[in-house]
Image (spheres, rainbow, N blue to C red):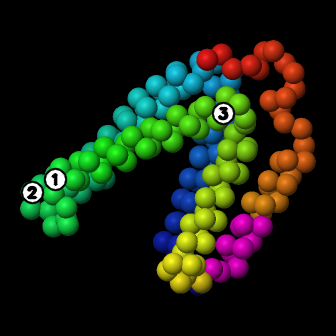
Amino acid sequence: AASFEHIRGDLYAVLGAVLLGLDDVLSEILVTDFGGVREMLFMKGLFGALISILQICFFEVDNVRDLFSASYGAPCDMSRRMGLFITHIAFRALDVWGEMEFLVVSEAALLNLMLLTSDLYAALFDVARVGLHLTGYFYAAFGMICFGIVLYEAGPSPTESGDSENTPKD
């Protein structure tokens, strides 16, 4: 019997997946038809930072205070924590920039399918290194991803329609 917390967690996971897909589709439209990569990166950076700051203020303020306090029982000192934090920010920025550049030459459907294959690599690592046993749900989801890739590759690409209107403007 599934508890309310499990069902709520599943609903949040589905909502997050839908919002991620919607984000990539809208990013593709904005990058190819409107402002281009630079404007999209600026908007994602600006509003992403504002939303993150609000989330930190409401949900994570105690954790941030602990992170920057000298009495925090972490195995590394403050300079290393800040270095890891800055490195994380830099690699996230590179990730978003890479996705925007990818959307200039391809489309959001392929980007989402490609990102889903990262779950396969994570699962293979868990099986090989941690000894995790995968359930049938994983294999069913992976089969659906493979089916999606085959279905996607079976049709013509929308970016190859020959329209000069759909060429990137950046």
Q: Are marks 2 and 1 in contact (CB under 8 Å)?
A: yes
Q: For label 3, count other residues whose C-alpha is less than 10 Å away and answer few (under 14), some (14-19) or many (20+).
A: many
Q: Are marks 3 and 1 in contact (CB under 8 Å)?
A: no
Residue 70 vertical position relative to residue 111 in the rendered view, above or below? below
Please state the extent of the stretch shown in magenta in the rendering: 134-143
* SS for callout 3: helix
Q: Is 155 positioned to the left or the right of 111 in the image?
A: right
Label 2: state its secondary structure.
Answer: loop
Question: Gap between marks 2 and 1, in whole Å?
Answer: 8 Å
Q: Residue at x 46, y 25 (%)?
A: 42
Which circle's residue, 2 or 1, is located before the other in the chain? 2
Percent coordinates x, y for residue 138 in the rendering = 67, 73
| Residue 123 vertical placement versus 162 (above, below) | below
Q: Residue at x 72, y 66 (%)?
A: 142
The one nearer the camera, 28 or 57, is: 28
Indicate which label's residue lies in the foreground, 2 or 1: 1
Q: Which numbered marker is on residue 70? A: 2
Is residue 51 among the parts visible in the rendering?
Answer: no
Q: Amino acid at mark 1?
A: Met
What residue would you read off at disc 3?
103
Disc 1 marks which residue?
78
Disc 2 crowd rating (10 Å Cα; few below 14, some 14-19, many 20+) is few
For image coordinates 86% across by 52% down, the residue present is: 151
Q: Which residue is painted at 60% across and 21% down in the image?
A: 36
Which residue is at the front of the view, 88 or 14?
Answer: 88
Q: Position of residue 166 (x, y in %)?
A: 76, 20
Answer with mark 3 or mark 1, whichever residue precedes in sequence. 1
Q: Amino acid at mark 3?
A: Leu
Q: Amino acid at mark 2?
A: Ala
Quarter the N terminus occupies:
bottom right
Query: Which quadrant of the view contains residue 92?
Result: top left
In the shown orientation, is residue 100 left or right of residue 166? Answer: left
